[in-house]
Image (cartoon, helix red, strand yellow):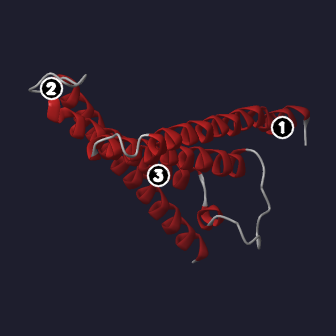
Amino acid sequence: MRPVPMLIFSSRWLQLPLYVGLIVAQGVYVVLFLKELWHLFAHAFDFSEQQIMLLVLGLIDVVMISNLLMMVIVGGYETFVSRLNLQGHPDEPEWLSHVNAGVLKIKLAMAIIGISSIHLLRTFIEAGGLTSGKTAYTETGVMWQTIIHTVFIVSAIGIAYVDRVSNMALDEAKRAASH
């Protein structure tokens, strides 16, 4: 390889510290999860059903964000930096065998929608206190959260549609080239 293409190709390794940083962030989420789990356990007999449900939704939220981090760390590294060579490993994630930038974008969009759904559900549960003034949420805030969630959904549909159209065009080009 010539020097400039070699430099450009080698620059992909500059992403390695970014993925290591995400692994550290994953560790922080484990600590947060354990802290919230302890809080739930310590107050299991003191909290109302609604408070317990909100704490459990918080735990689910942490897990979903953690799953998102894993998709970005593993899928991003495999797609943009270097192969992990996990073929045949019993713990190889099923989705990793067919990961590419398009699949990763769709999986990330779906994970963000899931996380947004949990936040919106928590908001709706707490918004029951809007009329009594016992919540930090406002009607406008709830409306904007709903609008933003809807935009996430529409964006994910758009990403999936563009990916599908792109794949159909590639498949058609391959068929035309083989004839």
Badge 1 marks a residue whose secondary structure is helix
Q: CA distance from mark 3 to mark 1?
A: 27 Å
Badge 3 marks a residue whose secondary structure is helix
Residue 49 spot, x, y in % from top left? 28, 47
Indicate which disc residue 139 carries: 2
Quarter of the figure with residue 135: top left
Amino acid at pointer 1:
Ser
Give the camera-side residue of 41 and 159: 41
Indicate which disc residue 106 carries: 3
Residue drawn at point x = 45 percent, y = 43 percent: 40
Residue 146 spot, x, y in % from top left? 23, 36
Which of the marked residues, 2 or 3, is nearer the chain's N terminus?
A: 3
Residue drawn at point x = 71 percent, y = 46 percent: 77
Which of the marked residues, 2 or 1, is nearer the chain's N terminus?
A: 1
Which of the marked residues, 3 or 1, is nearer the chain's N terminus?
A: 1
Q: Mark 2 or 3, which is nearer the eye?
A: 2
Residue drawn at point x = 66 percent, y = 45 percent: 73
Amino acid at pointer 3:
Ile
